[in-house]
Amino acid sequence: MRILAVMNQKGGCGKTTIAINLSSALCRLERRALLVDFDPQSHATVGLGLLAEQYDLTTYELMMDPAVRIEDAIQHLDSGIDLIPASTVLSGIEQELSDRLGREERLANMLSQLDDGAYDFVVIDCPPGVGLLTFNALLASSEVLIPVDASFFSVHGLAKLRETIEVLEDELQHRLAVHVVCNNLDTRTHFSRGLLDEVEKFHRRRPVFSRSSACRIRCGYRRVHQLVA
Ligand SMILES: Nc1ncnc2c1ncn2[C@@H]1O[C@H](COP(=O)(O)OP(=O)(O)OP(=O)(O)O)[C@@H](O)[C@H]1O
Ligand SMILES: [Mg+2]
């Protein structure tokens, strides 16, 4: 089971869009995918047509009460995607767990309840910013997918995340494969071409590439093939 956190501290760079499209493309490729909405904004939940307030069990309850069974929180959608919804109460988790030991490992413990063969991929849609939720996601994952859009702040978010990943590797021996997804770039602009060059220099492999919404689905689908091959 591959567990991927979709993460960048920069808001609005395409994390949720990619998490939803990736999960959907994985289903089309007949891979079993579980999408975990780990953002109090609940955009993955809302984006898949659900109302977060409707559900008694969300990522919040799973984080707060280790006795809750993960299977009970999974929604099986007609599209084939399995989703654990989020709700706005998740925003209080940092404070509510502030004095609990092992609070950074709650998501990892929760996902470890899944049978090994239950899913091929677990995709975690992370919130913007850096905090307890993003640490939980990193510790639960074996891979990080970092969307970078055409902005300096997005590249700054990539650099900061690489630093955090290095600390996790050095201090906790937690290894993470890193994928960079250049999202929503228009390569006709000088800025975007420079950004791609920088990301390629910085990152050993060529970044997965999505040029614009017009070609997003077609291009994204092909790239997903490369990612899961
Ligand atoms: N490749 C793309 N082509 C066109 N529009 C896109 C693309 N990727 C994202 N967007 C749009 O950009 C906006 C922000 O995307 P999204 O919500 O996925 O970002 P996010 O990183 O999840 O944001 P947040 O940090 O708030 O969670 C949305 O309106 C989305 O539709
Ligand atoms: Mg989002």
Image (spheres, rainbow, N blue to C red):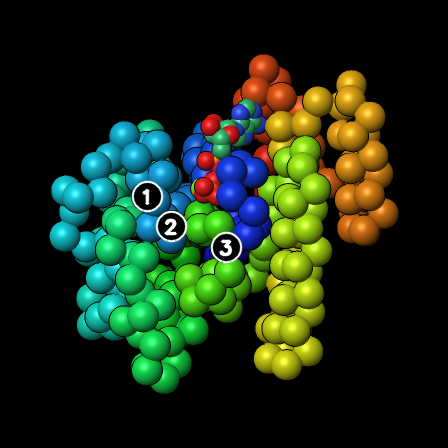
Location of residue 38 in the rendering, given as x and y in whole percent from the top left corner: 38, 53
Marks 2 and 1 sit apart, C-alpha to C-alpha, by 6 Å
Task: Give the residue type at disc 2.
Answer: Asp
Residue, disc 1: 42
Q: Is residue 218 visible?
A: no
The residue depicted at 67 percent of the width and 37 percent of the height is 151
Q: Sequence order check: which comes first, mark 3 or mark 1?
A: 1
Ligand 2 quadrant?
top left
Q: Is residue 132 visible?
A: yes
Residue, disc 2: 39
Q: Nearer the viewer, residue 88 or 171?
A: 88
Classify mark 1: residues with Cα within 10 Å, few (<14), some (14-19) or many (20+). Answer: many
Marks 2 and 3 sit apart, C-alpha to C-alpha, by 10 Å
Marks 3 and 1 sit apart, C-alpha to C-alpha, by 15 Å
Location of residue 196 in the rendering, given as x and y in whole percent from the top left corner: 78, 36
On screen, residue 166 versus residue 99, left or right, reads: right
